[in-house]
């Protein structure tokens, strides 16, 4: 098996990057990206589980101000629901190029 040292975490064919409570879904090389922000968590046994997640479909144009990049936004009550919406939004946005 070939060794791949640059293997990145992916979900439904798009890369995932996490920095603290922010998760970026998609590639900065594309026109759109999703930003997920974990706003609230609760402890279940030893694990922090997201209970409130902000989802934003954003343009990747670096010339726009951050508030002008946001195309759509929503809040979900779990990371699973947020990723489900994010996947649909990103696929639709990238398909409409």
Image: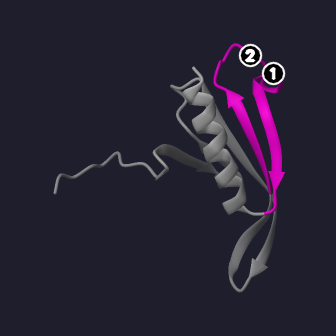
Residue 60 highlighted magenta (yes or no)? yes
Q: Nearer the viewer, residue 79 or 66?
A: 79
Image spot of residue 87 (x, y percent)? 61, 46
Is label 2 in a helix, a strand or a loop?
Answer: loop
Q: Which mark is residue 17?
A: none
- Residue visible at 66% across and 46% down in the picture: 86
Cβ atoms at labels 2 and 1 below 8 Å apart = yes
Q: Quadrant of residue 46?
A: bottom right
Residue that extends furthest to the bottom in the rendered view of this protein: 45
Residue ID for mark 1: 68
Q: Position of residue 7 (x, y in %)?
A: 36, 49
Instruction: Please state if 94 lies on the left or on the right of 79 as rendered.
Output: left
Q: Can you see residue 20?
A: no
Residue 66 in view of the camera: yes
Question: Taking 3 as reference, is 60 left or right?
Answer: right
80 relative to 55, above or below: below
Q: Residues within 10 Å of mark 1 (few under 14, many from 20)?
A: few
Quarter of the figure with the N terminus: bottom left
Residue placed at 54% from the left, 47% from the top?
16
* 54 up-or-down from 33: above or below: below
Magenta residues? 53-77
Disc 2: CA contacts within 10 A as few (<14), some (14-19) or many (>=20): few
Q: How is the image coloured?
A: one colour
Image spot of residue 77 (x, y percent): 81, 62
Q: Give the residue at x 64% y 24%.
A: 60
User: Whole-percent x and y of residue 76?
Assistant: 80, 56
Residue 76 sits inside the magenta stretch = yes
Q: Is residue 11 above or below residue 48?
A: above
The residue wearing badge 2 is 64
Task: Left or right? Give the position of 97 relative to 57.
Answer: left
Q: Quadrant of the C terminus?
A: top right
Question: Is residue 7 found left or right of 49 in the rendered image?
Answer: left
């Amino acid at each position: 098996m070939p060794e791949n040292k640059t293997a990145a975490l992916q979900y439904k064919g798009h890369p995932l990057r996490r920095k603290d409570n922010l998760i970026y879904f998609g590639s900065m090389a594309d026109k759109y990206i999703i930003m997920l922000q974990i706003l609230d968590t609760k402890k279940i046994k030893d694990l922090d589980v997201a209970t409130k997640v902000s989802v934003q479909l954003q343009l990747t144009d670096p010339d726009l101000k951050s508030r002008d990049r946001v195309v759509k936004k929503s809040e979900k009550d779990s990371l699973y629901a947020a990723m489900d919406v994010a996947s649909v939004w990103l696929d639709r946005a990238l398909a409409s190029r």
